[in-house]
Amino acid sequence: GAVVSQHPSRVICKSGTSVKIECRSLDFQATTMFWYRQFPKQSLMLMATSNEGSKATYEQGVEKDKFLINHASLTLSTLTVTSAHPEDSSFYICSARDLRQMNTEAFFGQGTRLTVV
Amino acid sequence: LAKTTQPISMDSYEGQEVNITCSHNNIATNDYITWYQQFPSQGPRFIIQGYKTKVTNEVASLFIPADRKSSTLSLPRVSLSDTAVYYCLVGDWKAAGNKLTFGGGTRVLVKP
């Protein structure tokens, strides 16, 4: 199946700093990418949806100025957690789809474990 | 997106068949049913997708009754490595504005 790569897989940062997470579709063009966060023992919570070349659509309760999403190309989306705090520590996962294709499956990255100390 | 309801957890033993039923009473005409598997600290992995009747691939079968208000994921002869959380998603995947929203999932524990 198609591959979505996230980087880094694990990151530790100091409180107040910013962290950027990359999500790349390696063998297909992703017209749409989704960003999720997941706390231990909980389900994935959708944070935002981004379409290539346009601004991201954020879910209710997600601060767009804190979680900056850029989807400048069909193969790359980035999530920047700005001024990170310990409560931002979580597992962040991206997902990518190509809505132009008949295959309607969404492919997920391996996730990024963010720890803010 | 149609809301889904799944059992919170299920226990099974190696070699047994595991069936997980998902309820989606408000499924729409254009909605597909998709199941994902997630291991700890990994992203979800696609298992199977269907629209109606029965779909089978190398890892699972998906049974969808005529009214499509529920679906059952069947995992034949599970092994310890099938211990994971299984999510049922329902949505019109072809729609440009469709969002992939996860419900609670079913935590399956396979015992030796």
Image (cartoon, coloured by chain):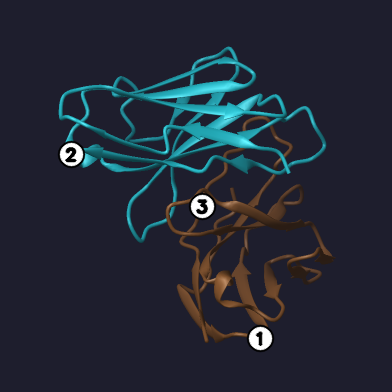
Question: Seen in the image, is A63 located left or right of residue A54?
Answer: left
Q: Residue at x 79, y 40 (%)?
A: A103
Q: Which secondary structure lies at badge 2? A: helix
Q: Looking at the picture, does residue A72 appear above or below residue A59?
A: above
Q: Quadrant of the C terminus of chain A?
A: top left
Question: Seen in the image, is A43 located left or right of residue A31?
Answer: left
Badge 2 density bin: few <14, some 14–19, many ≥20, Cα 10 Å? some
Q: Which secondary structure lies at badge 3? A: loop
Q: Looking at the picture, does residue B20 appear above or below residue A3?
A: below
Which residue in the protein does label 1 denote?
B15
Point out residue B62 in the picture as x, y percentages from the top left corner.
75, 68
Shade of chain A as shown in the rendered figure: cyan
Which residue in the protein does label 2 denote?
A86
Residue type marked 2: Pro
Mark positioned earlier in the residue sequence (3 or 1): 1
Label 3 or label 1, whichever lies nearer to me, is 1
Residue type marked 3: Phe
Residue type marked 1: Gly
Q: Which secondary structure lies at badge 1? A: loop
Q: CA distance from mark 3 to mark 1?
A: 28 Å
* Callout 3: chain: B
